[in-house]
Image (tube, rainbow, N blue to C red):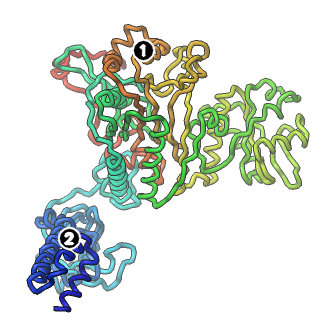
Amino acid sequence: MLCYKTHFFNINKSFGLFNQLSNLFQPNYNVLTININIILILNISLIVIYTYKIVHLHKQFFFRKMYRSHNCGELRLADVNKEITLAGWVQKSRDKGFMIWVDLRDRYGITQLIFDESRTEAAVMQLAKSLGREFVIQVKGTVIERESKNSNIPTGEIEVLVKELTVLNQSQLPPFTIEDETDGGEDIRMKYRYLDIRRNPVKNSLLFRHKVTQEVRNYLSNLDFCEVETPYLIKSTPEGARDFVVPSRMNPGQFYALPQSPQTFKQLLMVGGMDKYFQIVKCFRDEDLRADRQPEFTQIDCEMSFIEQEDILNVFEGLTRHLLKKIHNIEIEKFPRMTFDEAMKTYGNDKPDIRFGMKFGELNAVAQHKEFPVFNSAELVVGIAVPGAASYTRKEIDALIDWVKRPQVGASGMVYVKCEANNQYKSSVDKFYDQEDLAKWAAATEAKEGDLILVLSGPANKTRAQLSALRMELGNRMGLRKPNEFAPLWVVDFPLLEWDEDSERFHAMHHPFTSPKPEDMHLLDTDPGKVRANAYDLVLNGNEIGGGSIRIHDKDMQALMFKHLGFTTEQAQEQFGFLMNAFQFGAPPHGGLAFGLDRLTAILGGQETIRDFIAFPKNNSGRDVMIDAPATIDNAQLDELSIMLNVKA
Ligand code: ASP
């Protein structure tokens, strides 16, 4: 009895609820109560065991009955002698006549199969000889220990001695080798993307993307964000790009636009009282494509009510920190913040890569009013100090000068100063500047002994952009942009409006729903370019990964903004009447942000290009070469849509 009692109370130490129950029984402790307690414990144990089984073994219940008992990545030495069934693709086979080895691949890994004349039936042996690359097969056999082990793969200590072989499907010879290092070029891999996806680098990128989206969903859902889907067939949303349009058969001559983002809908959800919204959503922008742009891309789109800018920065800094922790086990304390003006002055760029220095030093004060006419007439003279580059040869420096003179960069020339030992300076403008002058340049650009100062001059914005391009190029060449280092920062206080040379008017820098800073409102009429917005970007490693703003939630204010953007009252009403009408029904103060999921995933995955993280991406001309889209449609379809083509050759 005593023994039961001791045992019972020991167990209960770890179950608070039972402690209370047992206290109830304690005064009249006897055989009956002990029996009741034991039954109770047994029942609870059974529930715990079953719950464990349901949670941990459900995959087995659901997935492992049909074609396979295990996947190709999980068998180990501990499984030796087990009778198993595997299914997958033939990665490659080696036929030594009396023995055939086949690497069997699925999403989870590779397992070596062995067909051995002395242990495998002749018919199976015969069939094994006919297996080609990428055949889909099922095998039954016994797990055995390998004689020569392969430490490069997790299953490398075992192989499967095959007893039964079924060819589930044959395959043509694939157009490129399905290996990590493939012989297939980009075009052929895109045409056969489903084969490319069988390769580890692409497959792992898709799995990585899945992990990122799962973490995003977890994080936001835990903060009460609700995922709401918004429509794809809508009216144009002005995010600054061209719309993709879809003709409406039922409304001849009318078109839907595919959303450039769910911007107006998420704001309407706030009017609808949803409070915290997010959506992992496709957006469509008909822009000229750069290497890392896609006509359809995915955003993590969010909006919140009754918040201020600081709340949004906190939530999304938290999300980024959560992702860095979960994915790379990296902890970053507070993200630095920089105003737009500061970013432009210090890095010539509103999305600076702060993993490395080479900050801009403005040299107007120390380089102008001397004899050098090029600098004297320039709006801005600005330089960077390239660490350790004083040793560059004349040829290397000339190559850099040619690089900045390329039409893509557009500089007209570049001045250099070598910072040599004992505070000696050698420059391409020695004729105009003495050692004392150049020492001032070195101070302004924070150049040290051994550095090379590179200086550009010209109109301020253009020159900043050129020097920024050079800084990034040098960062790449010198290996300073390390993919496994993460340097996030917020850029805040963006201008509300930007001047567009082509249309000769102001455009919204973010979008027309962004609210101006109240303290700058008085400048709206007199100096609109100076008005700052409650707008912010999150920058990671030199890429804008997210951006958003506090919105205008007042109808009159929104109407005023449209007026400043050059809309007549009628145009504003026609395009955005639905939003301004909604604002008449109690719109809460709100704001939000959207992260570009493709780019965020690529950067977290240590890559620059987003294509590998998209299952079926488009090429640089916006084509899907696998399904061959876009394509013409037949006349009957055009007729039905009331469309006549006028294609110019
Ligand atoms: N809709 C904006 C964009 O796609 C983001 C935002 O303001 O929330 O850039």
Question: Does 323 sit above or below residue 619?
Answer: below
Residue 145 lies in quadrant:
bottom left
Identify which amino acid the numbered label 2 is placed on. His
Question: Quadrant location of the C terminus?
Answer: top left
Q: Nearer the viewer, residue 298 or 67?
A: 298
Q: How far across and down, in percent of the image, does residue 541 sit?
A: 54, 47
Residue highlighted by disc 1: 556
Residue at horizontal 51%, vertical 35%? Answer: 536
Quadrant for ligand 1? top left
Question: Does 157 sit above or below residue 457?
Answer: below
Query: How many dots with numbers?
Result: 2
Query: For the residue carrying disc 1, how many other residues have a C-alpha within 10 Å: few (<14), some (14-19), or many (20+)?
Result: few
Q: How far across and down, in percent of the image, does residue 622 sit?
A: 37, 34
Taking the image as shown, residue 477 lies to the left or right of residue 58, namely right
Q: Nearer the viewer, residue 510 or 549?
A: 549
Residue highlighted by disc 2: 70
Taking the image as shown, residue 70 lies to the left or right of residue 211, namely left
| Furthest-left residue in this view | 32
Query: For the residue carrying disc 2, how many other residues have a C-alpha within 10 Å: few (<14), some (14-19), or many (20+)?
Result: some
